[in-house]
Amino acid sequence: MDKSAGRTGSRSQRTSKAKPRQRNLLKRAFYHTVRLSSRLLSVSIFELRCYGRENTEVEGGAMILSSHQSNFDPVLIGVTFNEPLNYLARRTLFKNRIFGTIISLLDAIELDRDRSGLAGLKETIQRLRQGQKVLVFPEGTRTSDGEIAPLKPGFLAVARRSGVPLIPVAITGAYEALPRGSRCPVRYPLRVAVGPAIRADEFANLDDQAMLDLVKSRLDSCYRQAQESRH
């Protein structure tokens, strides 16, 4: 056997094994760079204030259930939590060359709304079970009036199957800063309030409607806290 070929093969194997780690490090570095720059801009321009940050320190996997006011929201939640979050993104967003590259580097989970989206849901559950945190907007879309809209039941199955805590988060000011349909943001104070996590045993025996009511009440409580902090 050619020894040089064997050495080459060994180097090749070591390189191929190292690639996933290098890729993960790149994504983590990119995430923290984006997070830091976003936080600086949010605080300096939009006077971002976060309340209840002690509630973000949940060990292991968790679903972050946030109200949805504007396209700012993923950024605002990202700077509120110290550890990297997992975001959900429509499949069509990955087709945009620039934005697709950005969300790929952020390790977003691809959801195909035109089909069942089963692959994306499985990936979401897997990451939660691996101890990661995933951001979900249970309203399903951005608010039309700044208030928290009725919640959609789509997240319930993932929450039940993963068995992780649910962290309620509410945002105020983002609707005024960048309302739906607007492309240019305006300066407006932003507030984020994080509530205590809902443990899995708190909703394990609830039916879907009762679980939706529980989450909605916790979101409303966070929303009131965020609103009151502005006065």
Image (cartoon, helix red, strand yellow):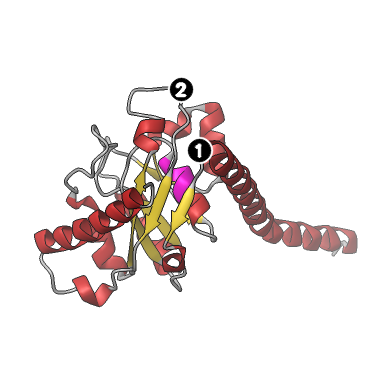
Q: Relative to the observer, which residue lies in front, 141 or 227?
A: 227
- Can you tell which quarter of the image residue 168 is in? bottom left
Is 153 above or below relative to 43? below
- Mark found first going from the N terminus, 1 or 2: 1
Report x, y in % for residue 218: 24, 61
* Within-10-Å neighbours for mark 2: few <14, some 14–19, many 20+: few
Please tell me which residue lies in front, 184 or 206. 184
Image height of 27 relative to 130, above or below = above
Quadrant containing the N terminus is: bottom right
**Magenta region, mostly helix, strand or loop?**
helix
| Nearer mark to the viewer, of 1 and 2 | 1
Residue 206 is marked as none
Q: Quadrant of residue 60?
A: bottom left
Q: Which residue is mark 1?
A: 46
Q: Position of residue 209 (x, y in %)?
A: 10, 59
User: Relative to 35, does residue 54 appear above or below in the rendering?
Assistant: below
Residue 130 appears left or right of 114: right
Would you say residue 6 sits in the magenta stretch?
no
Label 1 CA crowd tier, 10 Å (few <14, some 14–19, many 20+): many
Q: Is residue 229 left or right of residue 152?
A: right
Q: Amino acid at mark 1?
A: Phe
Question: Could one spot residue 119 in this view of the protein?
Answer: no
Q: Which residues are magenta?
A: 73-77
Position of 9 with respect to 132 (left or right) is: right
Alpha carbon distance from label 1 to label 2:
14 Å
Instruction: Please indicate whether residue 24 sits to the left or right of residue 141 in the image.
Output: right
Q: Position of residue 227 (x, y in %)?
A: 32, 48
Residue at 74% across, 57% down: 15
Return the residue at label 2: 184
The amino acid sitting under disc 2 is: Cys
Q: Does 206 appear above or below 51?
A: below
